[in-house]
Image (cartoon, grey):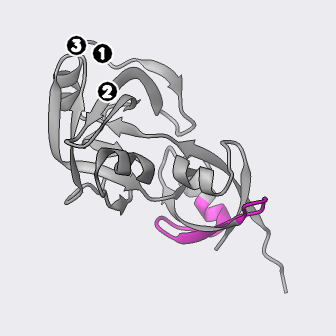
């Protein structure tokens, strides 16, 4: 009987950030969006632009806008950020913002209140279709991430297959702190 090869993936820690439509971006900024540094996901980048997130209970400044501009507005925060802002956003996959938390986004030009748009992002494993086929995985499969260190354990994550998908695992800062993980660490992916 053939033994399955072990699959290892590299961790990328995702800090709080926002995705904006051109319409909302133009209400917040007078300047075109510009690249600070490319991200591993092909075509995506951390922009030079930052915003402030505001609720009745708290404020978080210097939150990075991720480019390019999208077809939907989304604020991704950690549970720790949510507590600071007095929110209880659902844990969702990117783009699923219906019935999520309301939040105000402030830029240098103006501010916008989103009735829906604030989520905690699901843990996910990015990959392109070729990599998914190679690993025997498909979009939205649920996998286990086995962390083997002093605070080891197991997390679940969804597979996210996109044409521009660079093979890496996205978790937020709370998950990283809980499992003593850093960007670049490697974990075992179990089907």
Q: Name the N-terminal-most of marks 3 and 2.
A: 3
10 displayed left or right of 155: right
Query: Which range is magenta?
Result: 132-152
> Does residue 144 show up magenta in the picture?
yes
| Residue holding disc 3 | 30
Q: Earlier in the sequence, mark 2 or mark 1?
A: 1
Check disc 1 and report its element: helix, strand or loop. loop
Q: Whole-Å distance between the Cαs marked 3 and 2?
A: 13 Å
- Where on the picture, by quarter, is residue 85? top left
Question: Residue visible at 47% across and 29% down?
Answer: 45
Residue at 61% of width from left, 56% of height from top?
Answer: 178
Q: Left of 35 or right of it: where is 38?
A: right
Question: Going by the image, does 119 lie left or right of 7?
Answer: left
Residue marked by disc 1: 32
Q: Is residue 24 magenta?
A: no
Q: Residue at x 66, y 65 (%)?
A: 135
- Res 172 visible: no
Q: What is the x, y in percent for residue 134?
A: 67, 62
Q: Is residue 170 left or right of residue 54?
A: right
State the mark number for residue 51. Answer: 2
Residue at image coords 53%, 71%: 142
Query: Percent x, y for residue 121?
Result: 42, 54
Report helix, strand or loop for mark 3.
Answer: loop
| Residue 18 in sight here | yes
Q: Quadrant of residue 16?
A: top left
Between circles 2 and 1, the one closer to the viewer is: 2
What is the CA distance from the residue labelled 3 to the residue labelled 1? 7 Å
């Amino acid at each position: 009987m053939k033994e399955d090869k072990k699959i290892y993936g590299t961790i990328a820690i995702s800090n709080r950030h926002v995705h904006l439509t051109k319409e909302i971006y133009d209400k917040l900024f007078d300047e075109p969006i510009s690249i600070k540094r490319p991200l591993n996901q092909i075509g995506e980048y951390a922009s030079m632009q930052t915003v402030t997130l505001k609720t009745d209970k708290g404020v978080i400044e210097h939150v990075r806008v991720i480019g390019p501009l999208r077809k939907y507005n989304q604020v991704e925060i950690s549970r720790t950020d949510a507590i600071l802002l007095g929110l209880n956003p659902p844990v969702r996959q990117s783009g699923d913002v219906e019935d999520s938390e309301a939040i105000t986004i402030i830029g240098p030009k103006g501010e916008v209140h989103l009735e829906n748009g604030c989520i905690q992002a699901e843990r996910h494993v990015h990959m392109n279709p070729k990599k998914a086929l190679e690993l025997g995985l498909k979009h939205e499969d649920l996998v286990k991430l086995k962390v083997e260190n002093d605070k080891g354990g197991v997390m679940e994550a969804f597979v996210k297959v996109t044409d521009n998908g660079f093979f890496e695992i996205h978790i937020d800062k709370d998950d990283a702190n809980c499992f003593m993980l850093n960007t670049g660490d490697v974990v075992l992916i179990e089907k």
